[in-house]
Image (cartoon, rainbow, N blue to C red):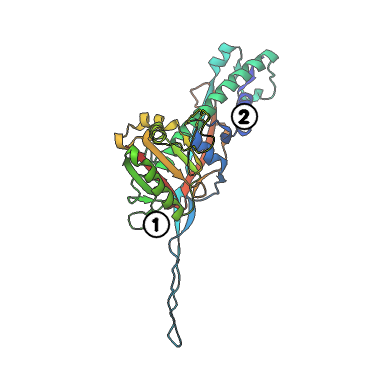
Amino acid sequence: MPISAPDLATVTVAALDNYMRNRPVDQIGTERPLIKMLMGKKKNLMPARQYSVETVRETYGSNFAWSFGETARTFNKRSTAAQAQFPWRVALDGLYLDWDMLFAAGIRVDPDPASKGKLVLEPNEKVILYNILTEHMEALELGFVEKLDVELHRDGTASADAVVGLDALVSRTPAVGTVGGLNAATKTYWRNYFAGAVATGSLRATMEAAWRNCIRNGGAPDFILAGSTFIDAYASVLTLTQNTEAGKPKMIDVATGQGARTGLYFKGVEIIWDPVFSVIDALETPVAASLWEKRCYFINTKHLKYEDDEMAVYNPTPPHNVRATYASLDLRCAMKTNRRNAHAVIVAA
């Protein structure tokens, strides 16, 4: 028994929608630590014309002074806030089921719209269609998450429609350019900490300086993300001090973590290895001094935010000259910060 084209479209979109909603992006493994962290704290993206907005305090506008007796007091009208505007963008992907491919698998599609609801698949045909849809949906999900994760790392310049990502919000040129509509060249508060070409012997001191700078401007970082080269350099300068039970033999492992967790810590925060750094190095081929594998990001997750409006699944109208059924997956999203100076990035030499 064949299946009608409208019924196939309905089944495909319903199955994909159910699949994606029951397997949300925030359930991915630790191999993608940045998107896992962002999804774990994500907010709903509210309808807006072009931007997701963060209100930032630029100054206290203080009029503090000393006074005694009848000394005249002065007053001022305070304007302390500015708006940082981050564009939301649309991430999309899709799939199509070729009717000839389905026919070769044992399912015939009836193109007659009037046959909707009148044709019922045999049990074996249902199994075939289920298996085909499952494979297509799994591949769609994995590919979508993979690409979204990469783009959330990048600076948003790869495309005019790309989302602004980590490389722009926590920049290697923090005093250059406009981010979120605020000019970092003139607004000194709108700059993250950066140190580049840091020699291995200077890593600890530089990390201390970065940490203090972050604390001064919004609190201690609670998420440290680094590439392989940086992690290896950091591990090489660690020293162990053991004062208790000194007479007993010790087994020392400087990397006792699992998966992307390195087991290496700084100020009590574990350094997380990001395998995507090497992927972006291959994609962007940056100069040696800017390699992602050499980077370490100090991130305060209270001040780095991700928003989306949940995935939308729908059935586009197929072209008149193609015999296939289409399903599309869209996601409006934005990545933003309300305190750039609460973050830091260090690049090892």
Q: Secondary structure at mark 2?
A: helix
**Residue shown at 37% from the left, 41% from the top:** 203
Residue 172: quarter of image = top left
Tell me whether circle 1 and circle 2 mark residues in contact (CB < 8 Å).
no
Q: Which mark is residue 301?
A: none
Q: For this rendering, which residue is in front, 229 or 8?
A: 229
C-alpha separation, residue under disc 1 versus residue under disc 2 = 44 Å
Q: Nearer the viewer, residue 271 or 33?
A: 271
**Vertical side of 65 occupied by 276: above or below:** above
Q: Residues within 10 Å of mark 1 (few under 14, many from 20)?
A: some
Mark 2 is surrounded, within 10 Å at the Cα level, by few (under 14), some (14 to 19) or many (20 or more) other residues, namely some
* Disc on the earlier residue, 1 or 2: 2
**Residue drawn at the location 39% of the way across and 57% of the way down:** 189
Which residue type carries mark 2?
A: Tyr
Q: Amino acid at mark 1?
A: Tyr
Q: Quadrant of the N terminus?
A: top right
Residue 104 on image: x %, y % = 56, 11
| Residue 146 position in % (x across, y down) | 48, 30
**SS at circle 1:** helix
Residue drawn at (45%, 88%) of the image: 70
116 in relation to 38, above or below: above
Question: In the image, 312: left or right of 304?
Answer: right
* Quadrant position of the C terminus in the picture: top left
In the rendered structure, the answer to whether residue 114 lies left or right of residue 74 reads: right
Q: Is residue 111 visible?
A: no
Q: Which residue is mark 2?
A: 19
Foreground: disc 1 or disc 2: 1
Where in the figure is residue 293, as x and y percent of width and height?
Answer: 38, 33
Residue drawn at 33 percent across, 50 percent down: 177
Check residue 189 in the rendering and tell me which mark sits there, or answer none.
1
Residue 124 figure quarter: top right
